Image: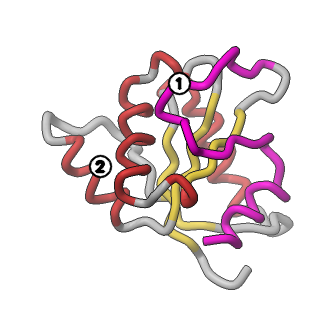
Amino acid sequence: MAKNNRIFISFAIEDKDSRNLLVGQAKNDKSPFSFVDMSVKEPWDEKWKTNCRTKIKGCDGMIALVSTKTTNADGALWEVKCGKEELGASRIRGIYVDSKNKPASLPPEFAGIRVVEWSWANIKSFLDSL
């Protein structure tokens, strides 16, 4: 691990446990990757989009957790759209929360974003590319 990337994690609120698992894995001594979690952990007031955009701008990349809940997660979809505007699609990686229960299709906000299985190798590869 050459550096500790600042990563914004986008997720549907229903996938909060998966986000917590990902952050926990990054802290595991046996994990081949680590990062500084910059995700939104609490709801913001009416200026949340401005605050969120500022946070995303300050990150090296974004991990977007993808599940069957993602399609209806307006906040998470906005974060992905904002991430594409601020970081570019190549600095965003979609990670399937459950490879056995993938959504039938990805929302349009994921156009141009690579989405992969949740594995330490895939996460490490993405972080190493930043």
Secondary structure category for the residue under label 1? loop
Of all residues shown, which one is farthest toward the bottom? 2
Q: Does 22 appear above or below 107? A: below
The residue type indicated by label 2 comes to Cys
Up-down: is 24 above or below 1?
Answer: above
Find the magenta span and give its range: 101-130
Identified at 74% across, 22% down, the residue is 102
- Quarter of the figure with the C terminus: bottom right
Q: Position of residue 15 (x, y in %)?
A: 58, 28
The secondary element bearing badge 2 is classed as helix
Amino acid type of disc 1?
A: Pro
The quarter holding residue 64 reads top right
Seen at 47% across and 33% down, the residue is 109
Number of numbered markers: 2
Distance in Å between CA atoms under marks 1 and 2: 20 Å
109 and 52: which is toward the camera: 109
Does residue 50 appear left or right of residue 29 in this picture? left
Residue 5: percent from left, percent from top: 56, 72
- The earlier-in-sequence mark between 1 and 2 is 2
Residue 74, position as x, y percentages in the image = 38, 24
Viewer-closest of 11 and 27: 11
Q: Is residue 128 magenta?
A: yes
Q: How packed is label 1: few (under 14 Cα within 10 Å), some, or many (20 or more)?
A: few
Q: Residue furthest left?
A: 46
Q: Which mark is residue 107?
A: 1
- Quadrant of image for the N terminus: bottom right
Q: Nearer the viewer, mark 1 or mark 2?
A: 1
> Relative to 90, does residue 128 appear above or below in the rendering?
below
Q: Which mark is residue 52?
A: 2
